[in-house]
Amino acid sequence: MSEHRVGLGIDVHRFSPDRPLILGGVSVPHHAGLLGHSDADVLTHAICDALLGAAGLGDIGTHFPDTDEAYRGASSIGLLAEVAAKLAEAGFCPLNVDATVIAESPKLTPHFPEMKARLAETLRVEVDRVGLKATTSEGMGALGRGEGIAALAVALIGRARPDPCT
């Protein structure tokens, strides 16, 4: 028998000039990047939280706190690799992730194939196990005014259970 678990992750960052925009481990051309202690990759952060939550391992802030200078400017893809290693240590493996990015701009769909490939490689899953979508907030609220970007992710993880009766 196997055990499956689902986790949800959400992240939001405001725009900041003079920073690159990194989403899903990919540099996306835009007038501003996102403000954060690391590279502020909201998509990857949401996926990290979904995976950690599914495994009952807390959240990204617990493992990579913004008070720790070791993570200043850190690559979020590198953090995702560490999350995947923590899952493996706990006996879990990612089965699939699905995420939605909420942004008025830039247009993200052209960048999804590269993002999916980068995320899948980091998680050691097939590309078709990474789902990405984008939407806007139809001009409503801070995201609608173009003040930042948000991402929501869900992850399914699994592990073999040694005792089928537990």
Image (cartoon, helix red, strand yellow):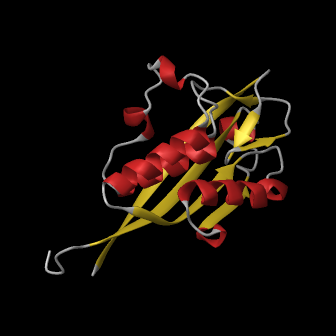
**Where does the image place residue 31, in percent across and percent down from the top left?**
86, 31
* Badge count: 0
- Of residues 138 and 100, the one nearer the viewer is 100
In the figure, 101 relative to 5: above or below? above
- Residue drawn at x 39%, y 35% is 63
- Please state if 20 lies on the left or on the right of 84 as rendered: right
Query: Which image quarter holds the C terminus?
Result: bottom left
Q: Residue 10: in sight, yes or no?
A: no
In the figure, 110 relative to 69: above or below? below
Q: Residue furthest left?
A: 165
- Please state if 85 lies on the left or on the right of 39 as rendered: left
Q: Residue 34: in sight, yes or no?
A: yes
**Where does the image place residue 120, in percent across and percent down from the top left?**
62, 60
- Of residues 122 and 12, the one nearer the viewer is 122
Which image quadrant for residue 117?
bottom right
Query: Which image quarter holds the N terminus?
Result: bottom left
**Where does the image place residue 85, in percent across and percent down from the top left?**
43, 50
Which image quadrant for residue 99?
bottom right
- Residue drawn at x 60%, y 43% is 77
- Please state if 102 lies on the left or on the right of 9 as rendered: right
